[in-house]
Amino acid sequence: MDMRTRQGSNTEHPIIELCDADQPLIAAIQRGLPLTSRPYNTIAEQIGWSEEAVIQRIEALQQGGIIKRLGVIVRHRELGYRANAMVVWDVPDNEVAELGRCLSGFEFVTLCYRRPRHLPQWSYNLFCMIHGRDREAVMDKFNLMIESCGLEDIPKAVLFSRRRFKQRGALYRPSPTTQTGESSR
Amino acid sequence: MLDTLDRAIINELQGGFPICESPYAVVAEQLGTSEGELISRLQRLLDEKILSRFGPMYHAERLGGGLTLAAMAIPDEQFDAVADQVNAFPEVAHNYAREHELNMWFVLATETPQRIDEVIREIEATTGFNVINMPKEEEFFIGLRFEA
């Protein structure tokens, strides 16, 4: 089935503190790793470190959870995941943790967060993202979540996306920008 | 179109990337291809915008930055104009139109946590519409993985 065991939010990382000396490294890789045979050496040359120092520090930043992972970020629409929905639930506060764990156990749930309500305009406090090949596939997954986690009586809404205006990685450090404004359906 | 090797590369590299002197060679060997072929395919997947990025996913808060989800209710006839105004802010990481009275949903990523409130006020001043801030209070899972 679609259930998989996954780690929740309480993954423990060794304590690691960012220091000022990390800033050039953080900035140098935030837009991407160089596509060179020795990418960490390319970074090292850019920021005046040794290759070994770059490798060790990136390793430490990843082990410490400051870098969640290295790798590719896909544009899901281009991979054929044409429907994405933000599925939201109005869950009693004392049941959020339990239901959050239940919902985040589905392999197709890519994000699951508790967020504040904004009454009266917005009454939902648990948010999940689901992606699927089409809307029907997303709705099938939605119905499976309701059945499996016993959410029949919980107020809920499915907010399909109509249009994506912008998708790029977050930038946290100033760097020369090439704006990636876009619009796609 | 993506062929079998493209898909294998995308699936493999959503799970991580080696931190060693010749990481592309390591991944290439696992996938049964050459280092040069892997690098040129990654370049093409980025150029063709199948991949939005190849690099680190930072933990915003641990990095000292701010991250939040925000929503606005915009009348249909003004939607595109307001979307242009909102997307012009470099702090807006992505923005989706969604089917709800709150119909514009975007993620803000800022260099400092305090900057989130400033940007929200700037967006409200620029657009003339209220912004609802919905920062995460608890995270149950994060990680985006799409089978290619």
Image (cartoon, coloured by chain):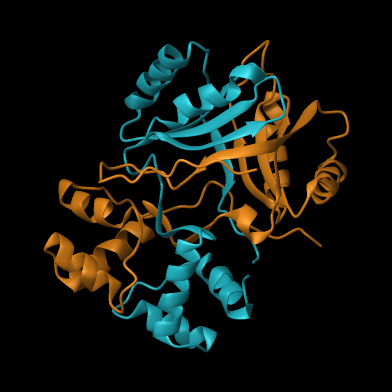
Foreground of the two, A140 or B48: B48
Quadrant, the C terminus of chain A = top right
Number of on-image labels: 0
Q: Position of residue A46 (x, y in %)?
A: 17, 63
Residue at 59% over, 76% down: B8
Quadrant, the N terminus of chain A = bottom right
Query: In which image quadrant can residue A96 be found?
Result: top right
Query: In which image quadrant can residue B43 be found?
Result: bottom left
Question: Drawn colour of chain A?
Answer: orange
Q: From what the image shows, is residue A144 above or below residue B48?
A: above
Q: From what the image shows, is residue A164 above or below residue B4?
A: above
Is A157 situated left or right of A152 in this image? Answer: left
Q: Position of residue B33 (x, y in %)?
A: 49, 88
Q: Position of residue B110 (x, y in %)?
A: 36, 34
Q: Position of residue B146 (x, y in %)?
A: 63, 60
Question: Drawn colour of chain B?
Answer: cyan
Q: From what the image shows, is residue A128 above or below residue B39?
A: above
Residue at 62% over, 72% down: B2
Foreground of the two, A76 or A113: A76
Q: Is residue B73 visible?
A: no
Is A146 situated left or right of A22 in this image? Answer: right
Foreground of the two, B4 or A129: B4
Q: Is residue A3 visible?
A: yes
Query: In which image quadrant can residue A103 be found?
Result: top right
Residue at 31% over, 35% down: B111
Q: From what the image shows, is residue A121 above or below residue A129?
A: above
Residue at 88% over, 33% down: A152
Is A48 situated left or right of B15 in this image? Answer: left
